Amino acid sequence: MKIKRKDINKNKVGEDIYMENNIQKKLWLSDFGQEYTERNILNPNKLNEAYIGNYGVDRIEMNEEFIKNLGLENKKILEVGCNVGNQLRLLQQMGFNNLYGIELQPYAVQRAKDLTKGINIIQGVADDIPFKDEYFDLVFTSGVLIHIAPENLSNVMKEIIRCSKKYIWGFEYYLETFMEVEYRGNNNALWKGDYSKEYIKYNPELKLIKQKLYKYLNNENVDFMYLLSK
């Protein structure tokens, strides 16, 4: 089943009402979102150090295991929910040079423009990605789907599938069944789940190429990376 832009049903009356009724979007557009941005500005070296501290493996090694041999160095890649572009800057350092990002929070987009060079980062929402069908060879998220309420995942995942010509890649918190987790004193802000399984639920024609669990060194939490293809 090929998803096209017209197939995405939002059932909203005006963008202002839509935003007001979406708890997660309101949270990230508030001061909470700006504080998150400033707290999480990491250059590629610091980002790798953070991954080593959490999992005992750096993000470059993870990336290489999943996408190094796909021939994407000159292909279009989009990160959905890129914040200030930490992951995109790391990909750029690895030799990927046709990089795009969309981010909900205007403050983060402006900070991204200050911190990045040669990466196209614009404001946009994950459930209405402002690019045409199959514009990108790979679309990915990193710690973004976890902040979308399970009842809203279908529109986001359908949009990601729509914009990808071939690959969908992700790194998120993992749990076999969805469970809400309090996030910095906020409810309705974070969920663990099996996100690759959810993608396939919404589009059964997707194929799971690879999936790997990464356990935290200092606790029992688990994250996972996955790669799907159309």
Image (cartoon, rainbow, N blue to C red):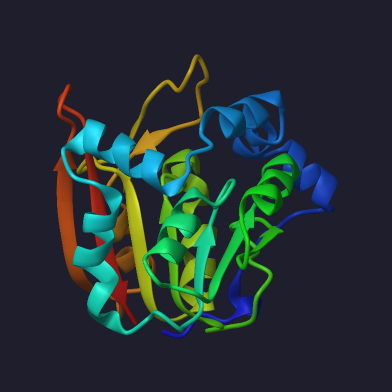
Of the pair 187 and 95, the residue shown nearer to us:
95
- Left or right position of 214 against 95: left
> Is residue 70 placed above or below 182 in the rendered structure?
below
Relative height, residue 225 to residue 120 (above, below): above
- Please give the name of the residue rendered at 50% of the width and 30% of the height, measured from the top-left corner: 189
Q: Is residue 154 visible?
A: no
- The furthest residue to the top: 185
The residue that appears at 30% across and 67% down in the rendered structure is 200
141 vs 122, left or right, is left
Indicate left or right for 124 with 24 as reference.
right
Q: Residue at x 15, y 55 (%)?
A: 212
The relative height of residue 23 versus residue 200 in the rendered view (above or below) is above
User: In screen coordinates, is 77 left or right of 84?
Assistant: left
Quarter of the image containing the N terminus?
Answer: bottom left
Q: Is residue 49 visible?
A: yes
**Residue at (44, 32) in percent of width and height:** 190
Q: Percent position (x, y) of residue 219?
A: 17, 22
Residue 16 falls in image quadrant: top right
**Residue 204 sits above or below residue 34 on the image:** below
Residue 21 x, y percent position in the rendering: 71, 38
Which quadrant of the rendered structure holds the C terminus? Answer: bottom left
Q: Position of residue 117 (x, y in %)?
A: 63, 61
Q: How many marks?
A: 0
Residue 123 drawn at (x, y percent): 71, 56
